[in-house]
Image: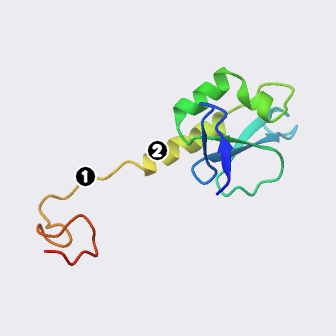
Amino acid sequence: MPVRLCVGCRRRDSWSELLRVVAVKGEPDNTINGAVVLVPDPQHRLPGRGAWLHPNTTCLEQAVRRKAFTRALRLQAGPDAARVAAHLETIRQDAVPHPIDHDRPTEGGSDADEHSMSTQQ
């Protein structure tokens, strides 16, 4: 499995665990006035040079503070990371575990081990 380097924490990890980020130049008629914007690429399909990042705000903050995106993507100026921050926020909200309903019995009963397909009793 391919291994990539997180530009935030500088740790190596599997590319499937990291978020690819691509720099896109804004259009002059857009509100960003031609500035470079970082765009998340969760499917790893957008064209152009990409930087890899663990999908958490700590690594994003470290990368912005160290200007790692500017170096990794070979940019002239610091890019706007607002879209990546918004994407990470939606991932974090989706990953929040829901409370367990304690009134319902768990699958497999109390005698089964932790595997759902277990026949051990």
User: What numbered label is drawn on residue 92?
Assistant: 2
Element assignment for label 1:
loop
Query: Residue at the location (17% across, 70% down)?
Result: 112
Q: Is any part of residue 79 visible from this angle? A: no
Kind of residue at badge 2: Arg
Image height of 106 relative to 10, above or below: below
Q: Give residue 2's position: percent from left, percent from top.
A: 68, 54
Q: Which residue is mark 1?
A: 99
Residue 52 can be seen in this image: yes
Outermost residue toward the bottom in this view? 119
Residue at 34% across, 51% down: 97
User: Picture coordinates of residue 49 (x, y %)?
Assistant: 82, 44
Please name the residue shown 18% across and 75% down the image: 120
Q: Is residue 40 left or right of residue 35?
A: left
**Within 10 angstroms of label 1, few (less than 14), some, or many (20 or more) residues?**
few
From what the image shows, is residue 8 above or below residue 15? above
Identify the residue shown where x is 63% and y is 46%.
19
- Which quadrant: the N terminus? bottom right
Q: How is the image coloured?
A: rainbow
Quadrant of image for the C terminus: bottom left
Mark 1 and mark 2 lie on one chain; the one further toward the N terminus is: 2
Residue at disc 2, secondary structure: helix
Q: Quadrant of residue 117?
A: bottom left
For residue 90, side relative to residue 4 (left or right): left
